[in-house]
Image (cartoon, helix red, strand yellow):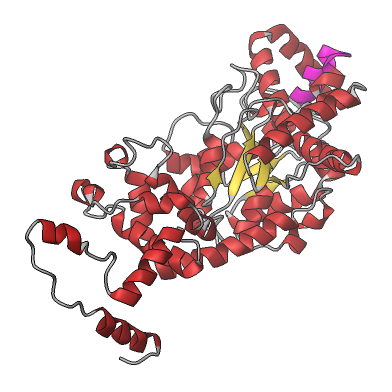
Amino acid sequence: MGVLVLSGTDDDRQVRMKEFAVFWGCTIPARFPFIEKATRLVFDDLGASVHELEGHTCCPEGVLVKANDENAFYSTAARNLALVEKAGLGVVTPCNGCYSTFKEAQSHLTTDWRLKDAINEKLAAQDLHYDGTVQVTHFAEWLSEDMGAGLVASKLTKPLWGMRIGVHYGCHLLRPSPAVRWDDPLNPTKVEALITGLGATVVDYTTKMQCCGNALDRVGEREGSLAFARRKLMDLMKNDVDALVVVCPSCFQQFDLNQAALQRAKEDVNVPVLYLSELIALGMGHTAEEIGLDMHRVSVDPFLEKWDDRQADKTRLATLFDVSLLSKCVNCQACKDDCPVCKVDANYQPTEILERLLRGEIDEVLADPQVWKCLECYTCQELCPSRIGMADAFRKLKELAVEAGTAPEQVGSAYDTFRKTGMLGAPRESARKKLGLSPLPASGGEALSRLLAKDDEGVE
């Protein structure tokens, strides 16, 4: 692939970024080999040619090393990058800390040429030289920019249909700017776009951009670290997420290991945590056993079980509705503000009900009284540019709700009256007589009742 080339098409970049050095860092191989395994599987499935270079050390970690000796921090980072440059490659790392360290070192040594020259004098003794031209890429960045969400999604055998995922970026994937310039440092979206491409629903939540707080553990502030973890986990649970996806081993440690510590202290927290490559590898058909998910401290079994259930829900939904039309309707929403009920009831949002269907919440929707607020006035259908509308979908939902026994009591009692009398109400003969109207002919209610009874018996 060579060093960073600034010209060329997106296809050229993808070809270049199929071959690179990988920098695992310290934490993943030592503490979380299952993250390494899943990442290797994703590399293989996407056709990457990965080189592992001899001589790498800690990136180094910023809080502990830089605070002691800033020159050691930059010298170590430059040496690691010089090894990659010597191999004529770029480097991909699945660690936020390593990514931020390398980006910060590149930025600083670009301006501090005296320090760069001094470091190169020392590196010369090891037959190394740091130019600063190496392309440094985070694993999530590689997926998003070099592979593309579409390519990743095309490799899935088990989409994340119906699953609700919270994303935690971690500070060092996005900052410090301008050294790190991959996504908006305060309002990022690119990892979420990857998750959406996998078929999941990304859940926004208040503490999304809150630091994980793991660094407090490294300086003896254990309670503070746990407080950070607790706050985010409670927020995620309040938003009914099925799992939290992280892209940093330190963040994984905070939300998996420290969540387990909170659970041992009998705190009510339970959010399965997955590194991004684990989620993708599962979607690509690799098993939990193959990846080693049983090595997590917080069980991911609830997530996996719900995922399996959602696959069954998807099959069931396809037997009841035209899923492609539902999706088209939800994505369009041109008639969203034209529903007459919405104008008088702010809580009624028919498109949200259809969105819930597409998330697999079939039984929950059928039990929701909101289904029965559709007037079947067909305003949405008349306004629909595709002549779809929502009325037919809501009619089907009402039928299913009756079968499920969740219809309003009035619906059932009115139908019972109809079955017995053939009418939904008896005429007031006194009022008719007062207006000079003749009595109505005898109704055919009894005959209809007998006819419908035969239908119940299966007689055509």
Residue in the foreground of this view, choosing between 341 and 79: 341
Which quadrant, please, contains the C terminus? Answer: bottom left
Spot occupied by residue 248 in the image (x, y as percentages of width and height): 72, 36
Residue in the foreground of this view, choosing between 368 and 294: 368
62 relative position to 395: left or right:
right
Residue pictured at 25% horizontal, 85% vertical: 447
Magenta residues, start to end: 66-79
Q: Residue furthest left?
A: 436
Spot occupied by residue 419 in the image (x, y as percentages of width and height): 34, 75
52 relative position to 176: left or right:
right
Quadrant housing residue 168: top right
78 relative position to 381: left or right:
right
Residue pictured at 31% horizontal, 35% vertical: 343
241 relative position to 346: left or right:
right
Residue in the foreground of this view, choosing between 71 and 244: 244
Residue pictured at 78% horizontal, 26% vertical: 213
Quadrant housing residue 24: top right
Spot occupied by residue 125 in the image (x, y as percentages of width and height): 84, 23
